[in-house]
Amino acid sequence: MTLLGLLWVLQGADLVRIQPIACVADCRPVTGGSFVWFAVGVLTLLGGLVVLGVRRRRR
């Protein structure tokens, strides 16, 4: 979860570009940053860090 959030942050900030893998219709790579993916990535990254923190406390 943490790594996926980090990937989304980097894609939203336009630091990483990945070509579409599975396309059904007119597939074009997303160019430029995306605030939505950046925000979702930050939330996912923070959620992953919280899960990791909770798991460490239980040990």
Image (cartoon, rainbow, N blue to C red):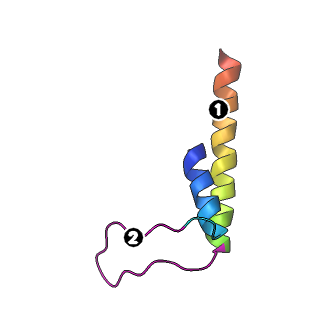
Q: Residue at x 68, y 54 (%)?
A: 43
Is residue 49 placed above or below 10 in the rendered structure?
Answer: above
Image position, residue 12 (x, y; %) = 63, 68
Is residue 54 in the magenta section? Answer: no
> In the rendered image, which quarter is residue 14 located in?
bottom right
Is residue 19 in the magenta section? Answer: yes
Magenta residues? Answer: 17-34
Q: Is the residue marked by circle 2 packed among few (<14), some (14-19), or many (20+) residues within 10 Å?
A: few
Q: Residue at x 28, y 76 (%)?
A: 24
Image position, residue 37 (x, y; %) = 61, 67
Q: Quadrant of the C terminus?
A: top right
Q: Which residue is mark 2?
A: 20
User: Which residue occupies the extreme left position in the image?
Assistant: 24
**Mark 1 belongs to which amino acid?**
Leu
> In the rendered image, which quarter is residue 15 located in?
bottom right
Q: Secondary structure at mark 2?
A: loop
Image position, residue 46 (x, y; %) = 70, 47
Disc nearest the viewer among 1 and 2: 2
Label 1 to label 2: alpha-carbon separation: 30 Å
Tell which circle, 1 or 2, labels the residue nearer the N-terminal end: 2
**Mark 2 belongs to which amino acid?**
Pro
Q: Which residue is mark 1?
A: 52
